[in-house]
């Protein structure tokens, strides 16, 4: 309706809000996937010590850091597009490297476990 009544300022605000929120929410999704993969790796490697090291307080702190970083990235995408592109490139690349490394390590550890069980039986 803003276009019909030619309220262009509202359209600019809506576009800016869309850019900031989409950038921030996509970043949160990618960082959440990365955190899940690292958490699974820690659970596998630490075993029974996992509950002592990965506490609920630590999880809350990491969650707050993720949301703060993503909101800053969203605001950067609004303020300076070049900085946003550079941060996106670095962020996406590092998340993908961490994801691949974590799941490769998990797969390797689990395949060694199953190979040991086959040789024992």
Image (cartoon, rainbow, N blue to C red):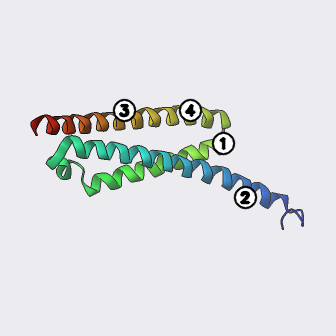
| Residue at left offset 55%, top offset 48% | 26
Could you tell which of marks 4 and 1 lies nearer the N-terminus? 1
Determine the CA span between mark 3 and mark 4: 18 Å
Query: Is residue 77 found left or right of 116 in the rendered image?
Result: right
- Whether residues under marks 4 and 2 lie with C-beta atoms below 8 angstroms apart, the answer is no
Establish if 91 lies above or below 16.
Answer: above
* Farthest left residue in view: 120
Nearest to N terminus: mark 4 or mark 2: 2
Q: State yes or no: discs 3 and 1 in contact (Cβ < 8 Å).
A: no
Q: Is residue 96 above or below residue 18?
A: above
Please tell me the numbered disc located at residue 101. Answer: 3
Dot 1 falls on a residue whose secondary structure is helix
Which tag is nearer the camera, tag 2 or tag 1?
2
* The C terminus: image quadrant: top left
Choose the circle earlier in sequence order: 3 or 4.
4
Q: Position of residue 48 (x, y in %)?
A: 14, 49
Q: Quick check: 57 left or right of 96?
A: left
Which mark is in front, 2 or 3?
3
Q: CA distance from mark 3 to mark 1?
A: 33 Å
Residue annotated with mark 4: 89
Look at mark 2 in the image and give the residue it sits on.
Answer: 14
Label 2 vs 3, first from the N-terminus? 2
Which residue is at the front of the view, 116 or 4? 116
Q: Secondary structure at mark 3?
A: helix
The residue carrying mark 1 is 79
Which residue is depicted at the point 77% across and 54% down? 12
């Amino acid at each position: 309706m803003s276009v019909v009544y030619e309220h262009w300022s509202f359209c600019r605000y809506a576009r800016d809000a869309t850019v900031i929120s989409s950038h921030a929410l996509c970043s949160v999704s990618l960082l959440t996937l990365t955190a899940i993969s690292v958490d699974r790796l820690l659970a596998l490697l630490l075993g029974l010590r996992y509950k002592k090291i990965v506490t609920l307080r630590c999880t809350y702190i990491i969650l707050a850091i993720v949301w703060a970083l993503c909101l800053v990235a969203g605001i950067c995408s609004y303020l300076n597009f070049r900085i946003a592109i550079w941060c996106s490139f670095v962020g996406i690349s590092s998340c993908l490297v961490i994801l691949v490394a974590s799941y490769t390590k998990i797969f390797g550890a689990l395949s060694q476990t199953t190979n040991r069980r086959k040789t024992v039986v």
